[in-house]
């Protein structure tokens, strides 16, 4: 368990001494036009990760609260407009760092992984034509906001889907941004990108497709396990791809990760104006979750015990 001060120092050292130098060695130092920022990239990344861990939902709130708490450690934290620009310009660095954390923890080689999707609304469906956000084409290759359906709230929304693929201990291996429109089965191939051969993948009944499951097993040696729907009877053809009872507790792990992303990291309340900033915030929150899992593993703790990772002083 870390104190908050030690947590900040640990995150900074992890980035400054391990992750950021490796990125610069592989890709070079990120270049920007104009004046150099007053914060170093490692400082900016540290402030973001700690701020998202503490549950700050906007860049303004993050800037103000982190400046009030740790301004004496980060004297370069001066300009409220420069900080979010620098943060957004580092989205490629954060994407690489997330992949590096997964690589160091052997996430892609995990023999059992779980997939699911979650709604990422940007506005109510009724306001989609009056919205002022996401009006221009994105500079990033990716989905456009569309109509989607949130089963938990039983309502339509306008926005995106967030894909999740996690290991059996809760590390997020892959988290693509997906189009909201359409059934979860249309996201199957995107969620399985990068899965190694001889890996078992657990999904819910939305991913049930016997023909595609057989193809994945024969061509890519990936066994996609799903429960049968209520109106289906077990058959010899379906049996190798039917979710066995021992995997059901593992299936619940993704519900835990889902809840942490919603309740602690507020991924369903992203206040952004375009796809660039959406991608930046999404990958920052995924990276923050992965680093917390990494720290818990280092301390030989429950990887998903984020509540107990930092001990806050009683006031």
Image (spheres, grey):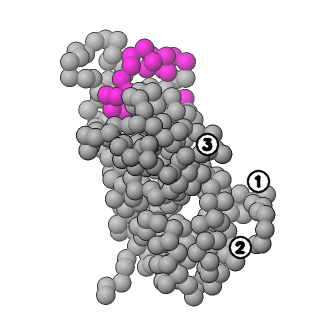
Element at label 1? helix
Cα separation, mark 3 vs mark 1, equals 27 Å
Image location (x, y in percent) of residue 103: 59, 48
Determine which residue is flagged by label 2.
37
Q: Which of the marked residues, 3 or 1, is nearer the chain's N terminus? A: 1
Answer yes or no: is residue 102 visible: no
Q: Is residue 72 left or right of residue 26?
A: left
Image location (x, y in percent) of residue 12: 59, 72
Q: Given contact means CB atoms under 8 Å apart, are the residues at marks 3 and 2 in contact?
A: no
Determine which residue is flagged by label 1.
27
Q: Which residues are magenta?
A: 197-219
Determine which residue is flagged by label 3.
137
Q: Nearer the viewer, residue 271 or 9?
A: 271
Image location (x, y in percent) of residue 60: 50, 71
Q: Look at the picture and state if 115 lies above or below 68.
A: above
Is 85 a magenta residue? no
At a point 39% along the width and 46% down the height, the residue shown is: 127
At a point 45% along the width and 27% down the height, the residue shown is: 186
Q: Residue 223 appears in which quarter of the rendering?
A: top left
Is 215 a magenta residue? yes
Answer yes or no: is residue 258 visible: yes
Cα separation, mark 2 vs mark 1, equals 20 Å
Q: Is residue 97 left or right of residue 299?
A: right
Image quarter of the N terminus: bottom left
At a point 43% along the width and 20% down the height, the residue shown is: 213
Q: Which of the marked residues, 3 or 2, is nearer the chain's N terminus? A: 2
């Amino acid at each position: 368990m870390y104190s908050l001060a030690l947590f900040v120092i640990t995150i900074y050292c992890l980035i400054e001494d391990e992750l950021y130098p490796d990125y610069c060695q592989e890709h070079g130092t990120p270049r920007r036009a104009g004046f150099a920022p007053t914060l170093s990239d490692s400082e900016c990344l540290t402030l973001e990760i700690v701020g998202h861990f503490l549950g700050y939902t906007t860049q303004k709130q993050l800037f103000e609260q982190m400046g009030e708490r740790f301004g004496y450690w980060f004297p370069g934290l001066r300009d409220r407009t420069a900080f979010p620009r620098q943060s957004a310009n580092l989205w490629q660095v954060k994407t690489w760092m997330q992949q590096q954390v997964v690589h160091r923890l052997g996430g892609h080689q995990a023999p059992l992984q779980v997939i699911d999707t979650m709604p990422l609304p940007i506005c109510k469906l009724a306001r989609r034509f009056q919205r002022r956000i996401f009006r221009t084409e994105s500079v990033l290759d990716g989905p456009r906001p569309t109509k989607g359906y949130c089963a938990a709230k039983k309502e339509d929304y306008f926005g995106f889907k967030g894909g999740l693929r996690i290991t059996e201990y809760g590390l997020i291996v892959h988290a693509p941004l997906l189009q909201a429109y359409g059934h979860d089965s249309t996201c199957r191939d995107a969620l399985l990108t990068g899965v190694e051969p001889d890996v078992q993948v657990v999904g819910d009944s939305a991913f049930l497709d016997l023909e595609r499951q057989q193809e994945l097993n024969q061509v890519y040696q990936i066994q996609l396990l799903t429960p049968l729907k209520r109106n289906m009877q077990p058959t010899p053809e379906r049996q190798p791809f039917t979710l066995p009872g021992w995997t059901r507790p593992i299936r619940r792990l993704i519900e835990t990760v889902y809840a942490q992303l919603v309740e602690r990291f507020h991924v369903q309340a992203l206040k952004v104006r375009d796809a660039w900033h959406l991608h930046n915030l999404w990958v920052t929150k995924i990276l923050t979750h992965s680093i917390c899992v990494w720290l818990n593993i280092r301390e030989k703790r429950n990887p998903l015990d984020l509540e107990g990772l930092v001990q806050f002083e009683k006031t």
